[in-house]
Amino acid sequence: MRTVAISLSLLASFALAAQVPEPSGKGAEAEARAAAAAEARTRTIARMLVQVEGRHRAQVADLERIVRLCEESRHDVELRLAIHARHAEDEDYRARMRAFEVDLGAVLYARFRAAMDVGPGSEPALRAIPAEPPPPPEPLPHEIEEQDAAKRAREEEGGG
């Protein structure tokens, strides 16, 4: 089982990208307060998201352990109860994650999910690293001859 040890500052930094633009002009103070409130709300939701994820992972690990023990000891009633509890936990978890996605928005939620799936200690890739462009193709033989002829013509004009 992987633990959820995501830096809240990393998660909250994602929220900064989704905030309103810099306040300017009339009502700048009110805009700054609104932006600070939105950032605080996003940080709170990020903390809740991490807590729900950690609880879910711990619960699933416990239920999997119980299922394995029940299978080994052939306790059918307890096995069915543990499997039922696992399905109920999964449904509850999916419902909570859908609610977080609605609260945060699809893009910001996807960035949070990526950060949690990558695990602690590594920055998630926020954009793909572009590949180096391919080298230009080699000129064809007739193109080389044309280039050589043009070069000789320039030399003759300049030298003659």
Image (cartoon, rainbow, N blue to C red):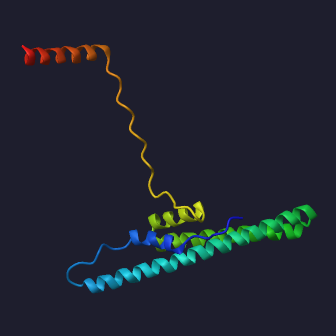
- The part of the image, by quadrant, that contains residue 53 is bottom right
Q: Is residue 27 above or below residue 121?
A: below
Q: Residue at x 32, y 17 (%)?
A: 140
Decide which of 73, 142 is in the foreground and name it: 142
Decide which of 56, 81 is in the foreground and name it: 56
Q: Dividing the image into 4 quarters, which one contains the C terminus?
A: top left
Left or right: residue 158 compared with residue 84:
left
Q: Position of residue 75 (x, y in %)?
A: 91, 67
Q: Position of residue 84 (x, y in %)?
A: 77, 69
Left or right: residue 7 compared with residue 1:
left
Q: Is residue 150 above or below residue 58?
A: above
Q: Position of residue 22 (x, y in %)?
A: 29, 75
- The part of the image, by quadrant, that contains residue 120 is bottom right
Left or right: residue 117 compared with residue 20:
right
Decide which of 50, 153 is in the foreground and name it: 153
- The part of the image, by quadrant, that contains residue 37 is bottom left
Q: Residue at x 40, y 72 (%)?
A: 16
Left or right: residue 51 compared with residue 150:
right
